[in-house]
């Protein structure tokens, strides 16, 4: 069965520091990978997605992610974090139809 | 466009009560789904629909019913609420593309507490 793991439950970084959120997946077919962000009390917003092609994908708000098939990973990065980036981040893999399997999420706190 | 809307935003039920969570989208999306979000578990799929009149079960369907009579609406029914159904519920929609994966648009969520 498909699964997504996000090893870090909670990460704290200082504003201006770089960020990397880890995501590993298990899926037998070609993965379709997504990162969503959820601000407190809000719904989910798509940051970026990977279907095929260039393994480094750019998203909104200055985020990028790199797909590494050999490591079954799709880590999210940002070179300089802003206080407004504090939120919960979810990695997801697209499965049959249009359904997703989500990871448990990583909560990001940003120190001033 | 309003996107995906959900009502109510908050709801408190007693064990055994029934209710319907409403979801509507105005993007003419064929694909709609319901997820529940619980701490440390991400979002888990409850039911989904690939078009009007077609629904199917997701990962955690027990205790929930759905129907899809129109493209726009996809209500989720709790027939007899249980404390284990305390959660935040999200509705999502996307344009279906065979063999393709499109962005899912999420509603703002309904926070349900069952006492």
Image (cartoon, rainbow, N blue to C red):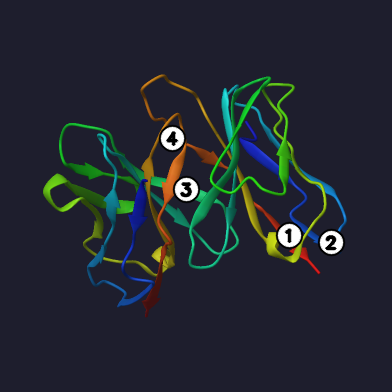
Give the SS element for disc 1: strand
Circle 1 sits on which residue?
Answer: B112
Q: Is residue A88 left or right of residue A26?
A: right
Position in image of residue B52 (x %, y %): 66, 20
- Front residue of this view, candidates B107 and A105: A105
Q: Of callouts 2 and 4, which one flags the residue occurring earlier in the amino acid sequence? A: 2
Circle 2 crowding by C-alpha within 10 Å: few under 14, some 14–19, many from 20: some
Circle 2 sits on which residue?
Answer: B13
What quarter of the picture does the C terminus of chain A occupy?
A: bottom left
CA gap, disc 1 and disc 3: 21 Å
Position in image of residue A34 (x %, y %): 35, 45
Q: Residue at x 48, y 58 (%)?
A: B42
Give the SS element for disc 3: strand
State whether residue A51 is above or below residue B15: above
Q: Is residue B103 left or right of residue B107?
A: left
Specify the subunit that label 2 lies on. B
- Front residue of this view, candidates A56 and A1: A1
Specify the subunit that label 3 lies on. A
- Front residue of this view, candidates B86 and A91: B86
Position in image of residue B114 (x %, y %): 78, 64
Q: Nearer the viewer, mark 1 or mark 3?
A: 1
Specify the subunit that label 4 lies on. B
CA gap, disc 2 and disc 1: 8 Å
Q: CB atoms at circles 4 and 3 under 8 Å apart?
A: no
Mark seen at residue B103:
4
CA gap, disc 2 and disc 4: 33 Å
Q: Of callouts 2 and 1, which one flags the residue occurring earlier in the amino acid sequence? A: 2
Give the SS element for disc 2: strand
Circle 3 sits on which residue?
Answer: A45
- Quadrant of the rendered image containing residue B115: bottom right
């Amino acid at each position: 069965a498909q699964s997504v793991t996000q090893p870090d439950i909670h990460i704290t970084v200082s504003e201006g520091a770089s960020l990397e959120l880890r995501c590993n997946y298990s899926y037998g077919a070609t993965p379709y990978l997504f990162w969503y962000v959820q601000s407190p009390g809000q719904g989910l917003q798509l940051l970026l997605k990977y279907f095929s092609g260039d393994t480094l994908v750019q998203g909104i708000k200055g985020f990028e992610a790199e797909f590494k098939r050999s490591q079954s990973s799709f880590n999210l990065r940002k070179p300089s974090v802003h206080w407004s980036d504090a939120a919960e981040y979810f990695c997801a893999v697209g499965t049959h139809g249009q359904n997703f399997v989500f990871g448990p999420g990583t909560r990001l706190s940003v120190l001033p | 466009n309003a996107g995906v809307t959900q009502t109510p935003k908050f709801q408190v039920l007693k064990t055994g009560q029934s209710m319907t969570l409403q979801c509507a989208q105005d993007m003419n999306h064929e694909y709609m789904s319901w997820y529940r979000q619980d701490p440390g578990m991400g979002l888990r799929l409850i039911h989904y629909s690939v078009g009007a009149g077609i629904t199917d079960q997701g990962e955690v369907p027990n205790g929930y019913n759905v129907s899809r009579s129109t493209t726009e609406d996809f209500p989720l029914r709790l027939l007899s609420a249980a404390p284990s159904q305390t959660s935040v519920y999200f509705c999502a929609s996307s344009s279906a593309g065979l063999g393709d994966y499109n962005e899912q648009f999420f509603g703002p969520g309904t926070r349900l507490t069952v006492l």
